């Protein structure tokens, strides 16, 4: 059996690979860098997933090695929606496909029944692996969509969440490409 291939050198500062504020948006949170389990935003996100959105696309937040993996996160918002980007440097962190049961389900979130309908979408491939979904969320007095993109480049996995009344395919494609280009510049720079 041959030894595993050498791991690419980690990015010194994952925060340098984060997107700047998209036009018309302001910083809602961050940027924050450090071990994944110590970041305020990732702890808050894990609590939200445990509360109701158990089928949410993304990284397995409960893996023990996730807590110590180098990470960075930033969130932007406007009256139209939000963009959240997280980066984590951890081999084999790429999430599995969503199971069929997660295509449509309901959960009780803060006392309200919320319906989630998720479909996989085909964005132009990026990195070593990539996957994208759009989830329609209705209930609790809201109706919105969440675009979720994950991209693996070497050992770094990027998660991009775009929340809006209606997620536009072109906008999600452009945000994903820009985020990936910024990540590859940081990895090679």
Image: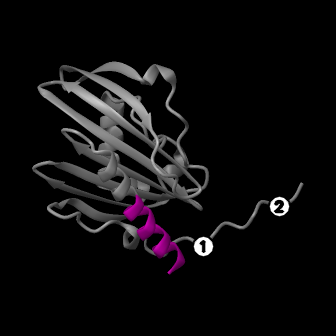
Identify which residue is drawn at 67% across, 66% down: 7
Say if 166 sits above or below 77 in the image: above
Residue 121 placement (x, y as % from top left)? 43, 38
Q: Position of residue 111 (x, y in %)?
A: 18, 21
Mark found first going from the N terminus, 2 or 1: 2
Name the quarter where the N terminus is drawn.
bottom right
Q: Magenta stretch: dominant SS?
A: helix
Estimate the x, y position of residue 81 in percent, counting from the top left.
Answer: 18, 47
- Magenta region includes residue 183: yes
Please tell me whether residue 11 belongs to the stretch shown in magenta.
no
Relative to 73, say whether 186 is above or below: below
Residue at disc 1, secondary structure: loop
Q: Quick check: 82 left or right of 13?
A: left
- Any part of residue 98 in sight: yes
Instruction: Name, please, the residue furthest toward the right.
Output: 1
The residue beneath circle 2 is 3
Name the residue nearer the viewer: 73 or 79: 79
Residue 32 drawn above or below residue 44: below
Q: Residue at x 41, y 47 (%)?
A: 149
Residue shown at 47% from the left, 40% from the top: 62
The answer to whether residue 89 is left or right of residue 41 is right
| Residue found at the far bottom of this picture | 189
Question: Which quadrant of the view contains residue 132?
Answer: top left
- Which region is colored magenta? 177-189
Q: Nearer the viewer, residue 126 or 2?
A: 126
Crowding at label 1, few (<14), some or many (≥20) Cα neighbours within 10 Å? Answer: few
Pointer 1 residue: 9
């Amino acid at each position: 059996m041959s030894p595993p291939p050498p791991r690419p050198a980690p990015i010194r500062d994952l925060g340098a690979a984060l997107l700047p504020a998209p036009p018309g948006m302001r910083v809602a949170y961050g940027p924050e860098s450090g071990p994944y389990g110590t970041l305020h935003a990732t702890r808050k996100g894990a609590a939200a997933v445990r509360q109701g959105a158990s089928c949410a696309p993304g990284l397995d937040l409960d893996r023990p090695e996730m807590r110590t993996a180098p990470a960075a996160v930033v969130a932007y918002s406007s009256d139209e929606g939000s963009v959240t980007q997280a980066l984590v440097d951890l081999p084999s962190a790429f999430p599995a496909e969503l199971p069929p049961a997660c295509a449509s389900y309901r959960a009780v979130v803060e006392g309200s029944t919320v319906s989630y309908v998720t479909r996989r979408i085909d964005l132009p491939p990026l990195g070593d692996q990539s996957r994208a979904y759009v989830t329609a969320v209705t209930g609790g007095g809201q109706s919105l969509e969440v675009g979720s993109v994950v991209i693996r480049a070497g050992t770094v996995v990027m998660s991009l969440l775009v929340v809006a009344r209606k997620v536009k395919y072109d906008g999600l494609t452009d945000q994903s490409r820009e985020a990936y280009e910024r990540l590859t510049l940081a990895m090679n720079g």
